[in-house]
Image (spheres, helix red, strand yellow):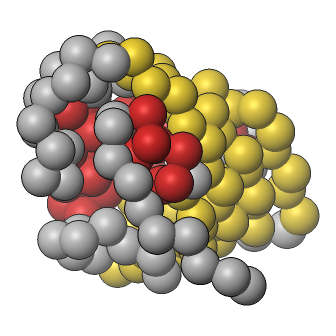
Amino acid sequence: MSTPGPKEILGRALEEIFNQGRFAAAEELIAPDYINRDASPGQGAGPNGVIHVARLYRTAFPDLKLSIERMISEGDWVAVHVREEGTHLGPFEGIAPTGRRVVWNWIGIYRVADGKLVERWGRIDTQLLYEQLGCRLMKTAL
């Protein structure tokens, strides 16, 4: 039996924790000292921090579906482009449910050690998400 690589570990985490809502899988796949360098408000470290974010999204979008569009791995690192979609049926970051079906993308770069996710950098296309929810964000120049 071979040891799963970073792509398999990340793919399994996204599928089980976010798509299936199997939060117990976080203990197996997320290191106790896991840190998200671009954390959501209220997100702590470790498995509980990931569970917090998964609950936030699964509450707001009960039919949440993450699809991996691209994944590249080198050594202990894995980069991923994810497409998310769901119907806004619960509160989300102060926005009352709209009933709208929304689709957005994000990218993440993860580090894996000892078979668990230990670190993440990422960006969500919040502009696209909020526009679909009927909110306007101020555009900033780079």
At 28% from the left edge and 75% from the top edge, which residue is drawn? Answer: 45
Tell me if I can see residue 32 in this picture. Answer: no
Relative side of 78 to 123, left or right = right
At 42% from the left edge and 62% from the top edge, which residue is drawn? Answer: 137
Q: Position of residue 32 (x, y in %)?
A: 31, 72
Relative side of 106 to 61, left or right = right
At 86% from the left edge and 51% from the top edge, which residue is drawn? Answer: 72
Is the C terminus in the top left, top right, bottom left or bottom right quadrant?
Answer: bottom right
Tell me if I can see residue 48 in this picture. Answer: yes
Q: Position of residue 5 (x, y in %)?
A: 73, 49
**Looking at the image, residue 120 lies above or below residue 127:** below
Q: Nearer the viewer, residue 92 or 81?
A: 92
Relative side of 2 to 93, left or right = right
Is the N terminus in the top left, top right, bottom left or bottom right quadrant?
Answer: top right
Relative side of 100 to 4, left or right = left
Task: Count the numbered circles shown.
Answer: 0
Q: Position of residue 29 (x, y in %)?
A: 43, 50
**Looking at the image, residue 87 lies above or below residue 105:** above
Q: Residue 30 sits in which quadrant?
A: bottom left
At 33% from the left edge and 37% from the top edge, which residue is drawn? Answer: 134
Q: Nearer the viewer, residue 95 or 12?
A: 95
